[in-house]
Amino acid sequence: MTGSKTIFVWVVSLALFFSACSKAVVEADIVIENGIVYNGYNDQASNGSIAIKGEKIVFIGDSESVVIKAVKTIDATGLIVSPGFIDPHTHADRDLNKPKTAHNLPFMMQGITTVVVGNDGDSFFPAKSYVDQYKKHGIGTNVIMLIGHETIRKEIIGLSDRVATEKEISEMKALLDKEMQDAGNFGMSTGLFYAPGSYAETEEVIELAITCAENGGLYDTHLRDESSYTVGLVAAVEEAIEIGRQARLPIHISHIKCLGVDVWKQSDTIITMVEKAQQDGVEVTANQYPYEASATGLQAATAPKWAQSGGKDSLLIRYDDPKFKTRILKETKNNIRRRGGPESLLVVVVANPAYRNKTLHQISKELGLTPEEAVYEVLRTNGTIRVASFNMSEYDIHKFMKMDWVTTGSDGNTGHPRKYGSFPRKYHKYVKQEAVLDLPAYIRQSSSKTAEIFGIPNRGKLKEGYYADIILFHPEKFRDKSDYKNAFSYAEGLEYSIINGKLAIDQGVYTDGLFGKVLRKTPAPETSP
């Protein structure tokens, strides 16, 4: 019996030896093991290993089926492993263009590995010079660029409130075409709510959108009206859909919302409109930030559009003119009302500390003025003046969030906590606490769906051959820390961030690496030797 047992053990050992010898060998720089893996497109989690070599994922699966030889092993026990998040609406270019802030940590610490810039019709010009600048000093996250309609319009027409001529539209189309070719922009953005973009008629935007479509781009829009300022929310969505229909290109509605008491609960109508357009063959999607307060400039939120023609200096000149002052104050008062009243407008960015972190109601009381008069006293302050505007209902936030065509976005800008907290807040509040979404839907809305909408190849999913943009976060600790009074606190709970195969966050600590790239929609144009 003893001899038989010895022979049996010898045979089994030999079989295991030859089995191990026959396994494929995977050479890797990094291997992630033992994590709770969500690949961005399946609902079920797995516990497979992920091997990374260079910039790419070279293996995903059961590590027992191969031999993985890795330089670094990450034990992801208890952590969620996900595709890096893609933020479709940011103003991160204002940080990326400075070497000291090019790390993009407010976004990176949320698990974001790729940001879209040039939103709301406002982009840096010319885009190619910023592509070169980002490459020269390095950037922390990947970046996708849009060209702003407002930027193009200012180059050709300036700030005037007037209709573009046919010649000017042709010049804008030529400039848009050049920008998209030179910088590989993924599309065009509009800020039709803001002057001077608001001065454009729909036909002008359609013509430019046709040029965008010819370059394979999408149309990203801040709607002409998210409230009841001008045409109204429903008509603004209709306009966006019509632009997509006539120009034959995808439409992406930025920070979809029902802004202000006049349009609360119109989300049901908007959802019906969008899904009808989708059935008719128009590609319509949207992004959303998970907050009840929006943020914008005090001037944009309160001052009449017609009075803003020419910029803030022209607005204040008109305000000081008795011929216009009464009308301006009347319309400003109504704009404050539709935003929820002076108590709902919190000044978060302003040079004068006497106004900072105070509501318009508080400021008006201190100045002994009406709220509408106080607006123009604050506007006389030099520099940027931004407000958090508490004007949305949870009903509409939940309705939009549940749609599979709505993705996670931040609209990250100075002074609002969303720049530092959008993605972890959505997880902590709307997945963990309120169960509005489940975890696979949250990850899909934050990664693969956005990559699909923008046409970003080989990113947004955990798949072999895809770029290794991967994050690992703690399921109980991942949450936002910024709020409206302290909007500059990094999120917590992100343990690892891998960008283009390199460790940018290691055990919760930034590694000082600048591993991001400028991604292009179109190949770089050939140059003569």
Image (cartoon, rainbow, N blue to C red):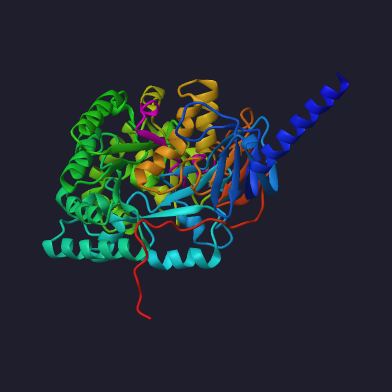
Q: Quadrant of residue 264?
A: top left
| Segment colored magenta | 400-420
- Name the quadrant of the N terminus: top right
**x and y, in percent, of residue 109 in the image:** 58, 44
Task: Name the one closer to the observer, 527 or 68.
Answer: 68
Majority secondary structure in the magenta region? loop
Looking at this rendering, what residue extends furthest in the right direction? 2
Percent x, y for residue 215? 26, 57
Residue 481 falls left or right of residue 382: right
Q: What is the tally of numbered marks visible in this picture?
A: 0
Residue 188: in sight, yes or no?
Answer: yes
Above/below status of 21 relative to 34: below
Q: Residue at x 65, y 37 (%)?
A: 33
Based on the displayed image, in which of its 4 quarters is residue 138 positioned?
Answer: bottom right
Residue 472 on the magenta segment:
no
At 56% from the left and 39% from the top, the residue drawn is 60
Q: Is residue 401 magenta?
A: yes
> Which residue corresponds to the image point at 28% horizontal and 25% vertical from the top-left?
266
Residue 490 appears in the rendering? no
Which residue is at the front of the view, 174 or 356? 174
